[in-house]
């Protein structure tokens, strides 16, 4: 269901963050010229990998949410959406995030959460 999808989605997003941050991190040797001739401060930012995380947040996360909210039927009817749904559910089915269910159960008991009755 939905909780399994959300855990799989988070695993997918985190994996994308790590991969893109690793790919976009620029490391220069001493004496090399800065990338595109930018200043030293901007070059230090490029070397942190945060640029990749910023791009991932904007393009891979927020853009999809905006499209889904503006065109829900087209978004849900897209075959790519179905494939991504299956990938997220497969990630959760591997059991890699099983600890999240234990933590959620403990948090539920400590906080006194109850199911919403409609």
Image (cartoon, grey):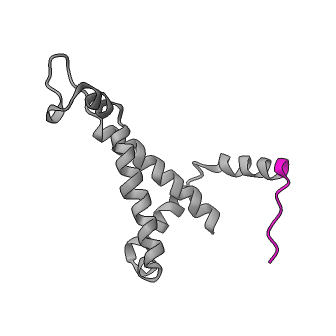
Look at the image and tell me in which quarter the C terminus lies: bottom right
Above or below for 91 versus 36: below
Look at the image and tell me in which quarter the N terminus lies: bottom right
Left or right, 27 with respect to 55, comes to left
Q: How many marks?
A: 0
Is the magenta region chiefly helix, strand or loop? loop
Q: Which residues are magenta?
A: 109-118
Q: Quadrant of residue 59?
A: bottom left
Magenta includes 77?
no
Please state which of residues 112 and 81 is positioned toward the viewer in this rendering.
112
Q: Quadrant of residue 74?
A: bottom left
* Residue appearing at x 51%, y 51% in the figure: 11
Q: Position of residue 63 (x, y in %)?
A: 39, 63
Q: Position of residue 90 (x, y in %)?
A: 51, 61
Left or right, 63 with respect to 91, comes to left
* Residue appearing at x 47%, y 47% in the figure: 14
Above or below for 45 versus 15: above
* Residue appearing at x 14%, y 32% in the figure: 37
Q: Position of residue 16 (x, y in %)?
A: 40, 49
Please state which of residues 77 and 64 is positioned toward the viewer in this rendering.
64
* Residue appearing at x 79%, y 53% in the figure: 108
Left or right, 70 with respect to 51, comes to right
Please state which of residues 99 and 108 is positioned toward the viewer in this rendering.
108
Q: Position of residue 15 (x, y in %)?
A: 44, 47
Extreme residue in the top direction: 30
Above or below for 2 versus 61: below
């Amino acid at each position: 269901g939905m909780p399994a999808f959300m855990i799989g989605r988070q695993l997918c997003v985190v994996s994308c963050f790590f991969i893109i941050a690793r790919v976009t991190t620029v490391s220069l040797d001493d004496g090399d010229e800065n990338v595109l001739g930018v200043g030293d401060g901007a070059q230090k930012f490029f070397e942190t990998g945060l640029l990749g995380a910023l791009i991932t947040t904007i393009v891979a996360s927020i853009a999809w949410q905006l499209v889904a909210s503006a065109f829900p039927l087209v978004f849900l009817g897209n075959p790519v959406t179905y494939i991504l749904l299956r990938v997220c559910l497969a990630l959760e089915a591997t059991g890699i995030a099983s600890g999240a269910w234990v933590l959620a159960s403990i948090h539920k008991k400590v906080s006194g959460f109850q199911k919403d009755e409609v």
